[in-house]
Image (cartoon, rainbow, N blue to C red):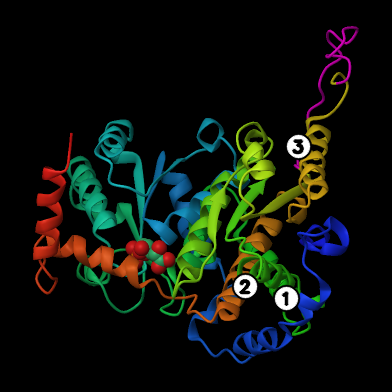
Amino acid sequence: MLEVYFGNMLEEVIGEKGLSLSQIEGIREKVLSAHKQIEERKWKELAFLDLGSQKTTEIKKIARNIRETSEHFVILGIGGSAIGPRAILESLSPLHNYRGKPKIHIFDNIDPRTIATMLEVIDPAKTTVNVVTKSGNTAETIATFMLLWDKIEKAVGSDVVNRFILTTNPEKGIIRSLIKEYNIKNLEIPTTIVGRYSVLTTGLLLAEVAGISSDELLRGAYEITEKCKSGELWENPAYIFSSLLYLMSTEEGRNINVIMPYADGLKAFSDWFCQLWAESLGKLGFGITPYPSVGTTDQHSQLQLWMEGPEDKVVIFIKIKDYGRDIMIPMVLSDKEGFNCLAGRSLNELMSTALQSTEHSLSNASKPNVTIAIPILDAYHVGQLFQFFEIATAFLGFLFGVNPFNQPWVETGKNNLYGALGKPGFQTRNEQIEKMLKDSVCWKI
Ligand code: PA5
C-alpha cells in the first residue's frame, strides 16, 4: 500500500522552515469543508473516485484483437488524453518497443517532423489507431487522425473503418458523429470524467495491449480510494499531503512543487502530475507550479538550486522500495579504490542510498520535502499513485477555493485555434491579435 512520509515538512523534524502543529490544526475547518465536498459528492466530476470498480471485459476483447492483428498500435490524443496512457506504458513496460508486439506509439503533438517520420515508419496495413479525445473536437488530435485515416485508407481501402478505435464522450463532438456514420468501434469516456482525471479510462486499452493488467491498475485505485475516505486529517494520506502543501504555499510562500520519482519509468508520470497540478489548481491567483524531475539524474542538475536557490520549493519524492528487477554490480576491478565500494552492491541499493542522502541534505538544511513510497513498481501500485494524486488534487483545489475540474484557458486556446482556422461559430482573428503580430515585426533585431 502507498504510504506518505511527511515528517520532513514539520518544524519538529527539520526546524525553522517546517510547519508547526498549530499551523496545521489551524486549517481544520477548511479541511472539514473540503472533505464534505468530497464525501457528499458536491461535484459530478468526483465520479473519478468510482473508476476503480469498472468492468474490463470489453477492453480486454478489443486489446486481444489488436495484439493478434497489428504490428503497430498508435494512440493519438493530447493533454489528459495522452499523458496518462504514456505514464502507464513507461512505468510498467519499459523500452516496450524493443521487447513487445505490437509496437506502441503515442503522439500528442502536431510537430510535422515527428508526424511525417511516424507516417514513414509504420506499416499502415498492420496498424491499429486509438484516437482519444474527451470532447471529440480537439483540432490537433483531429488533424493527426485525418492524416492516419488517409494513409491507412490508401493501404486497405474501405477496411479503414476497422483499423480505428475512437475513445470519446458518449454524446457529442465530431468524433461521435463519425462513429455513428461509419459504425466505428468505440470506447466511452463518461461525461463526468475530466480529461486530466481520465487515465483510468483512456489508459486501460493501452495497458491491455501492452500486456499490463488493467484489473490490477483498477484494484490499486479502488483500494487507495478506500484508504483516503476518512475525514480525519491525520488518518487520510491524501488530505495530510495536500494540507501540508497548501500551508507551504499560502503561509510560507513555497509555490513550486518539484516532483522527483527515483525511477526512469516514472518520468512520464511526473509529466502527468504536472498537468494535473497546473491545470487543476492554477486559478484565481492561486496555484502551485509543478516541476518535473527524476532521481538520481537530477541530483546532478537541479539539486544545487534547491539547496541554495530561493526558498520557494517543496520537493515531493516518489520512492520505490523494490523495482521488481535488480542487478548486482559485478566484482570486477574490485581491488581498486573507488571501484571497491560499488562492487557487489545492487542498483536497487544504490538508488535507495542516493534518495536517502538527497532527503537528508534537504532536511538537514531545513528544506521541506515529503516522500510518497510504494513497495513495488507494479500495476496495482501505479493505479494507487494515479488515484492518490487525483484525490489530493481535488482536495487541494477545495482548500484553495478553486474549481479543480475546469480549464477555461485551455478551452479558450482551443477555440482561438479554430477561430484562426475560420471554423464557423468561432471568433476569427481579432484586432488585438493583428496588433500583436504588427508589434512583433516592429520590435525585433
Ligand atoms: O484536462 C483537460 O481537460 C485537457 O488537458 C484535455 O485533456 C486536452 O485539452 C485534450 O482534450 P480532449 O480530450 O477533449 O481532446
Q: Which residue is mark 1?
A: 228
Classify mark 3: helix, strand or loop: loop
Image quadrant occupied by the N terminus: bottom right
What residue would you read off at disc 2? 391
In the displayed structure, would residue 431 be above or below residue 440? below
Mark before the other along the chain sequence, 2 or 1: 1
Q: Amino acid at mark 3?
A: Arg
The part of the chain drawn in magenta is 323-341
Disc 2: residue Cβ within 8 A of ligand 1's nearest atom: no
When the figure is inspected, residue 190 is found, relative to residue 364, above or below; the finding is below
Left or right: 18 in relation to 86? right
Mark nearer the viewer, 2 or 3 = 2
Left or right of 365 on screen, residue 180: left
Dominant secondary-structure state across the stretch colored magenta? loop
Residue 363 covered by magenta stretch: no
**Residue shown at 41% from the left, 38% from the top:** 71
